[in-house]
Image (cartoon, rainbow, N blue to C red):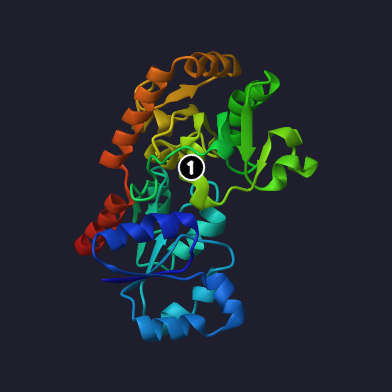
C-alpha cells in the first residue's frame, strides 16, 4: 500500500513512516504546512502523482483547513493518530476524528470518549525505531552526568509536578545536569527558568542518540499523569537508545515497565536525589537496567510493530 504523511516531524520521519517502510510499503512524507504556503494546490498535486491509498495525519492546528475539503473532493481516506490525547481531545482530536476513516490514540481512556461521539478508535502508543534509536558511541562534547531533553511546557499541571519532583531537586543540589530544548527554559514568561550554565541549547533530533550515549542518567517528564497508556514519547526513545532512564512516575509507566528492571521512577524530590546519587556511583547496575529497558522496547514497542497494528485494523475493518 501507499501512505502519504502530512508532517515531517521526527515522530513521523524517524518513527511511524519508517515502520511502514520496514514492512515493505511505499511511504511519502511531506511537510504540508510549509509546502502549502508555496503552492496552495500542493495536496492535489501530490495526491494526483503519488496516488496514496491513505493519508496519515497526527494533528496540528494548521493542518485541518489544508486537508479539508481537499481529501473529501479527492476521495482519499484519512488515518488520524491523535497524539495530543487526552489534553486536546475536544479542541484538536475530535474535528480530525470526525473526518477520518480510522482513528488511533495513544490514550486508552479516550477510546470510550470517541465512542460517545460515534467514532471507533483504536489504541496506538508511541514507540521507538531500532534503526535510529540505538546505542551509538559517546561524544565528548555531550558528556554529562545527567541530561533532560525537552521543552519547558508549563501549561500542563502534570508536567509542572514532574519538574518539581525530577528536575528541581537535581538543580538545587548543584549536580552536573544539562537541559536541552527551546530557549523557553531561559524565558521568565514560561513560569520556570534555569541558569544559563545549565542550558545546553537546542538539540537537533539527529543528535539524540549521541546525547543519550554520552550521559549516565536521562530524565523523564510527562504532560499526562492519569492515563494507563499515554506517556512522553521520549520514554521509548531513551530506552531504545540504551540509556538509563529516571522518570517521573505515572500509571502508564508503571503499567508498561518494571521499576528497577527496565527503568527507575521517582515519586518525590527526596527519592529523586537518592536514586540519582546511587546510580551515579553504581555503573554496572545502571547499565544492566538500561540494557533491559532497550530489550523491552525492541521486543514490544517498535514503530514497525505499530505500523503492523494499523494494517491489521485496516484489514479487519
Q: On the picture, is 193 further left or further right than 143?
A: right
Q: Is residue 19 visible?
A: yes
Q: Quadrant of residue 255?
A: top left
Q: On the picture, is 15 further left or further right than 267?
A: left
Q: On the picture, is 120 further left or further right than 237?
A: left
The quarter of the rendered structure image containing the C terminus is bottom left
Where residue 23 sits in the image (x, y, percent)?
Answer: 24, 60
Q: Is residue 65 visible?
A: no
Q: Quadrant of residue 90?
A: bottom right
Where residue 49 sits in the image (x, y, percent)?
Answer: 38, 85
Where residue 99 sits in the image (x, y, percent)?
Answer: 43, 69
- Mark 1 Cα-neighbour bin, 10 Å: few <14, some 14–19, many ≥20: many
Q: On the picture, is 74 further left or further right than 67?
A: left
Residue at position x 44%, y 29% in the image: 244
Q: Against 100, is 233 above or below?
A: above
Single out the residue that lies furthest toward the front: 140
Q: Against 136, is 69 above or below?
A: below
Q: Dot 1 corresponds to which residue?
A: 210
Single out the residue that lies furthest toward the right: 188
Q: Quadrant of residue 180?
A: top right
The quarter of the rendered structure image containing the N terminus is bottom left
Residue at position x 48%, y 49% in the image: 85
Circle 1: element type? helix
The number of callouts visible is: 1
Where residue 187 sits in the image (x, y, percent)?
Answer: 77, 43
Single out the residue that lies furthest toward the left: 316
User: Depth check: 202 or 109 in front?
Assistant: 202
User: Depth check: 283 or 258 in front?
Assistant: 283
Amino acid at each position: 500500500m501507499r501512505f502519504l504523511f502530512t508532517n515531517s516531524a521526527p515522530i513521523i520521519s524517524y518513527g511511524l513512516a519508517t515502520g511502514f517502510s520496514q514492512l515493505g510499503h511505499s511511504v511519502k512524507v511531506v511537510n504540508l504546512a510549509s509546502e502549502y504556503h508555496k503552492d496552495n494546490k500542493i495536496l492535489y498535486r501530490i495526491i494526483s502523482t503519488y496516488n496514496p491509498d491513505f493519508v496519515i495525519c497526527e494533528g496540528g492546528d494548521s493542518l485541518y483547513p489544508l486537508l479539508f475539503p481537499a481529501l473529501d473532493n479527492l476521495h482519499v481516506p484519512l488515518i488520524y493518530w491523535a497524539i495530543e490525547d487526552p489534553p486536546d481531545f475536544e479542541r484538536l482530536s475530535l474535528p480530525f476524528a470526525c473526518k477520518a476513516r480510522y482513528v488511533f490514540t495513544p490514550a486508552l481512556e479516550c477510546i470510550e470518549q470517541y465512542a460517545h461521539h460515534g467514532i471507533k478508535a483504536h489504541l496506538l502508543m508511541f514507540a521507538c525505531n531500532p534503526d535510529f534509536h540505538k546505542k551509538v558511541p559517546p561524544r565528548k562534547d555531550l558528556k554529562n552526568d545527567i541530561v533532560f531533553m525537552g521543552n519547558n511546557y508549563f501549561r500542563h499541571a502534570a508536567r509542572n509536578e514532574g519538574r518539581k519532583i525530577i528536575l528541581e531537586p537535581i538543580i538545587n543540589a548543584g549536580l552536573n545536569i544539562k537541559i536541552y530544548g527551546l530557549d523557553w527554559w531561559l524565558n521568565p514568561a514560561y513560569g520556570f527558568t534555569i541558569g544559563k550554565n545549565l542550558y545546553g541549547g537546542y538539540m537537533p533530533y539527529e543528535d539524540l542518540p549521541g546525547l543519550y550515549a554520552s550521559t549516565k542518567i536521562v530524565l523523564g517528564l510527562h504532560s499526562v499523569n492519569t492515563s494507563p497508556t499515554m506517556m512522553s514519547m521520549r520514554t521509548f526513545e531513551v530506552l531504545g537508545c540504551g540509556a538509563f532512564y529516571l522518570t517521573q512516575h505515572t500509571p502508564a509507566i508503571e503499567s508498561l515497565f518494571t521499576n528497577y528492571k527496565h527503568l527507575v521512577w521517582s515519586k518525590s524530590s527526596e527519592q529523586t536525589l537518592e536514586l540519582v546519587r546511587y546510580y551515579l556511583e553504581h555503573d554496572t547496575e545502571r547499565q544492566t537496567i538500561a540494557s533491559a529497558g532497550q530489550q523491552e522496547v525492541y521486543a514490544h514497542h517498535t514503530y514497525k510493530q505499530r505500523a503492523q497494528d494499523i494494517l491489521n485494523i485496516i484489514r479487519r475493518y
